[in-house]
């Protein structure tokens, strides 16, 4: 492990300013992903700026009905919050499907959003990987790619984004609040993560030293009728092969509205706009749900090892929507 400096600041502005001065540095939250990557020499920051005690640990109701989640709220606290469980059940379920109890007690909202891919080659410093070392190539393209992306990938990287929480936040149209050297800004979570393109070393649209301070969930309209379902190789303590976060609004047997996001299929949580559009105004029956899922997955470009993901995702979306429609 490369030696590094550990820094603490008085406040958020100080933390941002400290990191902005460093060419090679990272914010440290729970450390459950970053420290692992440092031990493996995958990430080699010269400085860690600890923000775990600086960003908010509060989950606050805002006057306009939004719910603000501080960046330091742990995954355990967020999953257990009664407002999350009642108004945004898909988010609580997504969190509880991730990692283990001990990890969730340490992992934070900011760190979970910004955790790095689980592509095995990214972690193995003896192999080429464009995300770890730009220009070296992508070992997964012709290697073991059964866990990899079927949507939105490029010839430079076919990795998937690992966060369950981010998939639910994507379906919920969450907004990420950021403080950086240039001040504060907000972006929809759908614009936080990137597709790999020619520069897969960049996971997100954040600039150096930009700190996630909170995530806002919009007022709950029909998100109370929502769920998260995850398919993985074993029943717990495993990342998603494919997952779906879905909310459904049905009236008189017709789909009025839907929110769907997929995990495990792309370099970012994948908002399924085509499926949502295909369903609105259609009868809330299996045929409509399957047609919508297939509309979304028509663009799937499987690799040698992951052709199973497109039918798996179609079945998962169909089954999940059917279950939601039958709950009413
Ligand atoms: C064995 C194991 C199994 C796991 N299984 C799952 C799973 O099934 N599903 C799942 O979703 N996750 C899973 N995880 C990942 C886990 O959820 C993440 O490691 C955790 O959420 C990261 O949060 P953290 O606070 O520890 O982040 P850290 O490790 O501290 O940071 C992660 C990254 O985010 C950056 N960062 C942290 N906070 C901020 C901030 N406020 N602003 C800007 N940048 C920031 C850091 O610089 C770093 O690059 C698993 C992890 C392990 C070790
Ligand atoms: S898929 Fe991405 S992370 Fe994995 S080896 Fe290829 S470039 Fe690296």
Image (tube, helix red, strand yellow):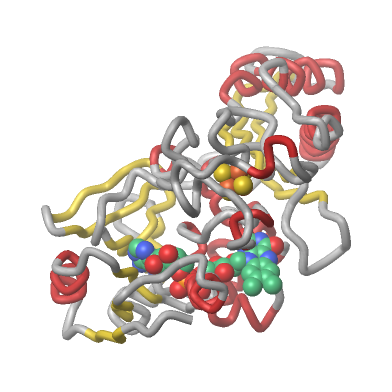
Relative to 62, does residue 317 appear above or below in the rendering? above
Left or right: residue 179 versus residue 312 is left
Relative to 128, does residue 314 appear above or below in the rendering? above
- Whole-percent x, y for residue 6 in the image: 30, 86
- Whole-percent x, y for residue 236 in the image: 82, 67
Question: Going 66% across and 38% down the picture, which residue do you hit?
Answer: 262
Question: Going 71% across and 75% down the picture, which residue do you hit?
Answer: 100
Quarter of image, res 99: bottom right
**Number of on-image labels:** 0
Relative to 230, does residue 55 appear above or below in the rendering? below
Question: Going 17% across and 64% down the picture, which residue do you hit?
Answer: 20
Q: Quadrant of the C terminus?
A: top right
Residue 108 visible in the snapshot: no
Pick the front one: 193 or 175: 193
Relative to 169, does residue 125 appear above or below in the rendering? below
- Whole-percent x, y for residue 173 in the image: 46, 41
- Whole-percent x, y for residue 245 in the image: 66, 43
Question: Going 72% across and 58% down the picture, which residue do you hit?
Answer: 239
Left or right: residue 209 versus residue 306 is left
Residue 130 visible in the snapshot: yes
Left or right: residue 79 versus residue 319 is left
């Amino acid at each position: 492990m490369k030696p590094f400096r550990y820094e603490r600041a008085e406040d958020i502005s100080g933390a941002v300013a400290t990191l902005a001065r460093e060419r090679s540095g990272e914010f440290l939250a729970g450390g459950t992903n970053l420290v692992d990557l440092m031990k493996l020499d995958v990430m080699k920051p010269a400085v860690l700026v600890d923000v775990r005690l600086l960003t908010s640990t509060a989950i606050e109701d805002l006057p306009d009905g939004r719910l603000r989640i501080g960046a330091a709220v742990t995954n355990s606290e967020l999953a257990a919050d009664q407002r999350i469980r009642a108004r945004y059940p898909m988010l609580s379920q997504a969190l509880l499907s991730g990692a283990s109890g001990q990890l969730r007690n340490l992992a934070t909202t900011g760190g979970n959003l910004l955790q790095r891919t689980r592509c095995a080659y990214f972690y193995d410093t003896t192999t080429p990987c464009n995300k770890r070392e730009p220009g070296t190539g992508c070992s997964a393209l012709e290697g073991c790619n059964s866990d990899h992306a079927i949507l939105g990938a490029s010839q430079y990287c076919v990795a998937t984004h690992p966060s369950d929480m981010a998939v639910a936040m994507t379906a919920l149209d969450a907004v990420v609040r950021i403080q950086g050297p240039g001040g504060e800004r907000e972006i929809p979570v759908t614009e936080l993560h990137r597709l790999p393109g020619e520069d897969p070393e960049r996971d997100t649209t954040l600039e150096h030293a930009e700190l996630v301070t909170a995530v806002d969930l919009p007022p709950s309209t029909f998100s109370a009728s929502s769920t998260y379902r995850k398919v993985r190789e074993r029943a717990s303590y495993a990342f998603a092969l494919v997952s779906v976060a879905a909310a459904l609004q049905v009236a008189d047997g017709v789909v009025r509205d839907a929110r769907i996001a997929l995990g495990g299929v792309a370099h970012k949580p994948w908002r399924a706009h085509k499926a949502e559009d295909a369903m609105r105004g259609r009868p809330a029956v299996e045929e409509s749900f399957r047609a919508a899922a297939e509309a979304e997955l028509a663009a799937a470009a499987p690799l040698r090892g992951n052709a199973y993901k497109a039918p798996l995702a179609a079945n998962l979306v169909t089954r999940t929507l059917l279950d939601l429609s039958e709950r009413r």
